[in-house]
Image (cartoon, rainbow, N blue to C red):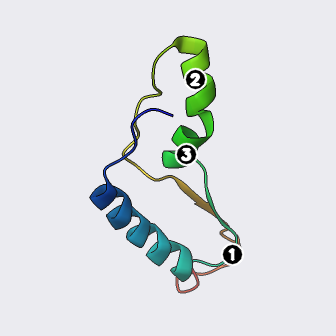
Amino acid sequence: MGPTYPDAETKLSRSYLETVANAARDPVFLVGGWGVYFTVTSAYVRTFGRDYSFSRDIDLGFHLDPGWGVEQI
C-alpha cells in the first residue's frame, strides 16, 4: 500500500466520525472518502501503476425515515 494519512489527521477525523456515528441511529455506514481509498488502493496501483488520490472528506450514509419530523432527524 502507498502512503497513508498523517496520524494526527487520522485521529482527529476518527474522533469526529465516532461522534457522528454515536449520535446517529443505526445503520450508519462509510460510503466514500477513506473507505474508498483503503478498499481500492491495491487494485488501483496494480492497474494504473500509481497510488489512488487521497481523499480528505468522509462520506457517511444513514437512514432517514420519511415519517420523522425535524426533532427526530
- Is 31 left or right of 5, judged from the image as shown? right
Describe residue 63's horizontal placement relative to residue 58 as left or right: right
Disc number for residue 32: 3
| First reached walking from the N terminus: tag 3 or tag 2 | 3
User: Which residue is identified by label 1?
Assistant: 26
C-alpha gap between disc 3 and disc 2: 15 Å
- Residue 21: percent from left, percent from top: 54, 73
Residue occupying the point 62% across, 40% down: 39
52 over 5 or under it: above or below? above
- Residue that appears at 47% across and 27% down: 52
- Amino acid at pointer 2: Tyr
Q: Mark 1: give few (<14), some (14-19) or many (20+) Cα within 10 Å.
A: few
State whether residue 49 is above or below residue 37. Answer: above
Q: CA distance from mark 3 to mark 1?
A: 18 Å
Q: Which of disc 1 and disc 3 is earlier in sequence?
A: 1
Tell me which corner region of the image, top left, top right, bottom left or bottom right, holds residue 64: bottom right
2 or 1: mark nearer the eye: 2
The location of residue 16, given as percent across then percent down, is 39, 70
What residue is drawn where x is 54% and y is 13%? 48
Rendering coords of residue 62 (x, y %)? 63, 65
Which residue is denoted by mark 2 in the rendering? 44
Residue farthest bottom in this picture: 71
Alpha carbon distance from label 2 to label 1:
31 Å
Question: Which is more toward the observer, 68 or 36?
Answer: 36
Mark 2 vs 1: CB contact within 8 A? no
- Crowd tier of the residue under label 2, counting other residues whose Cα lies within 10 Å: few below 14, some 14–19, many 20 or above: some
Answer above or below: position of 53 versus 56.
above
Identify which amino acid the numbered label 1 is placed on: Asp
The quadrant of the rendering that contains the C terminus is bottom right
